């Protein structure tokens, strides 16, 4: 009991120092629910995370509940490093996209390789050929992909760290990172992925590249919802700007050639696309769009992917098959958690979810040295936002996936 009181007192003192704001600053913030002692005390309107579970997890950590407290400590260890990292921008890259605008996101297909030595006349060594599962290190020369990963992960951790502690430093740094990547005129990213995962001398960009944003941008949507509960340094104008960016990007996803190509994908790309569109729809108040995706997930996504005996034939044919097979299970378990429970799809081969989970887990366990750990998260862990810090199983970013 003494330990619990000590934890509460320490976190409360931190929140007391961090939560005071000038009247002008308070007036500019989104309508929130912060108090001077412990920061936010309401459930944020998150898209993937469960806002009510976030609040329950916050109070569990405050009173010293072991699992929540351990996970929070792990989160804060990472978030403290984020305070001095970045900010990141798409305009930092040396290369210029085909549009001539550095504000456009640019990346290369990870599994495509040159067939000849580069020359002055053929600087890329074209033509390129595909080597599935073999990542070409040349993709790292364009920094947008790596910077995206670092920026979005930092924003997510910082927002969660502020929510759980009330420490204004985390909120202000998350705000800086968000403005730099999405909002500031000099550094912002245009809301499109026209030039994602291009192939030199073949195509400028492909729908398959959208997967680079599917998981991590969904986390950013949740981060801004968390900050909107009244974070210091995050204004109503900031929140409106992000909602506008999300709206434009969602429109691009649903109407552009690259977006509609990805929507048609029957493998992990299609279900990751659904996850991103649903998160953006929820983040912009378009609940009917998100509801339609959830309603159609069974017949349009899960049933085509999971065949007899639980096999995901479009993934087991890949060279790194167990890197991909758990993906639908994790994505749609998150959808199920967000809807208040789990799910089972009755398909041609019978109930498909549990069978596919069993196959994926057994298969991955047999891949010695493959570097893949299959952990199906419990709903409370997913909802509480601490799942990857020791509060449950772990979902994994597949942003390197491509073709």
Image (cartoon, helix red, strand yellow):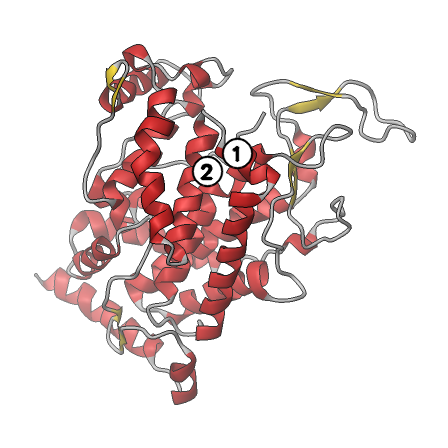
CA–CA distance in space, label 1 to label 2: 7 Å
Q: Is disc 1 in contact with disc 2, using a CB cutoff of under 8 Å?
A: yes
Residue 393 location in percent, x, y? 28, 36
Q: SS class of the residue under badge 1? A: helix
Whether residue 317 is visible to the viewer of this picture, yes or no, is yes
* Quarter of the C terminus within the rendering: top right
Residue designated by label 2: 273
Q: Nearer the viewer, residue 100 or 253?
A: 253
Residue 49 pos. (x, y %): 30, 50
Q: Nearer the viewer, residue 396 or 161?
A: 396
Give me the residue at 47% from left, 41% from top. Answer: 214
In the image, what residue occupies the spot 39% across and 46% down? Answer: 278
Residue 229: image x %, image y %?
33, 68
Name the residue at 41% across, 65% down: 170
Pick out the residue farthest to the right: 121
- Say whether residue 308 is left or right of residue 263: left
Q: Position of residue 141 (x, y in %)?
A: 70, 39
User: Residue 14 appears in which quarter of the rendering?
Assistant: bottom left
Q: Is residue 371 visible?
A: no
The answer to whether residue 266 is above or below residue 275 is above
What number of labels is visible?
A: 2
Q: Quadrant of residue 109?
A: top right
Q: Which of the labelled discs sits on residue 211, or is there none? A: none
Q: Residue furthest top?
A: 309
Instruction: Choose between 161 and 200: the one closer to the eye.
Output: 200
Specify the farthest residue to the bottom.
23
Which disc number belongs to residue 262? Answer: 1
């Amino acid at each position: 009991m003494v330990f619990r009181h000590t934890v509460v007192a320490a976190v409360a003192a931190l929140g007391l120092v961090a939560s005071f704001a000038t009247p002008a600053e308070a007036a500019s913030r989104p309508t929130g629910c912060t108090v001077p002692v412990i920061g936010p005390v309401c459930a944020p309107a998150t898209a993937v995370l469960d806002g009510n579970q976030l609040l329950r997890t916050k109070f569990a950590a405050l009173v010293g509940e072991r699992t929540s407290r351990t996970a929070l400590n792990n989160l804060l260890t990472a978030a403290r490093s984020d305070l001095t990292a970045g900010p990141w921008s798409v305009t930092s890259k040396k290369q210029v996209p085909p549009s001539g605008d550095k504000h456009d996101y640019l990346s290369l297909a990870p599994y495509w390789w040159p067939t000849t030595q580069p020359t002055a006349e053929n600087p890329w060594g074209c033509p390129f050929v595909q080597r599935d599962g073999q990542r070409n290190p040349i993709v790292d020369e364009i920094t947008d992909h790596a910077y995206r990963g670092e920026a979005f992960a930092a924003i997510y951790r910082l927002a969660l760290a502020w929510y759980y502690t009330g420490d204004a430093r985390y909120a202000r740094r998350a705000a800086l990172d968000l403005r730099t990547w999405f909002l500031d005129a000099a550094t912002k990213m245009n809301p499109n992925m026209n030039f994602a995962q291009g192939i030199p001398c073949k195509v400028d960009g492909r729908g398959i590249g959208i997967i680079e944003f599917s998981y991590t941008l969904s986390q950013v949507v949740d981060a801004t919802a968390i900050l909107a509960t009244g974070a210091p340094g995050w204004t109503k104008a900031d929140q409106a700007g992000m909602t506008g960016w999300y709206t434009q990007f969602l429109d691009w996803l649903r109407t552009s050639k690259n977006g509609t190509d990805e929507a048609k994908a029957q493998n992990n790309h299609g279900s990751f696309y659904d996850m991103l569109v649903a998160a953006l729809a929820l983040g912009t108040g378009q609940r009917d769009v998100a509801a339609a995706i959830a309603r159609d997930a069974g017949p349009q996504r899960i049933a085509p992917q999971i065949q007899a005996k639980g096999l995901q034939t479009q993934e087991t044919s890949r060279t790194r098959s167990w890197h991909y097979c758990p993906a639908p299970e994790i994505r749609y378990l998150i959808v199920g958690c967000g809807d208040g429970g789990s799910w089972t799809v009755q398909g041609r081969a019978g109930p498909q979810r549990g069978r596919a989970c069993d196959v994926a887990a057994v298969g991955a366990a047999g891949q010695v040295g493959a570097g893949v750990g299959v952990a199906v998260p419990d709903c409370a862990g997913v909802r509480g936002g601490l799942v990857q810090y020791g509060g449950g199983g772990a979902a994994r970013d597949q942003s390197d996936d491509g073709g």
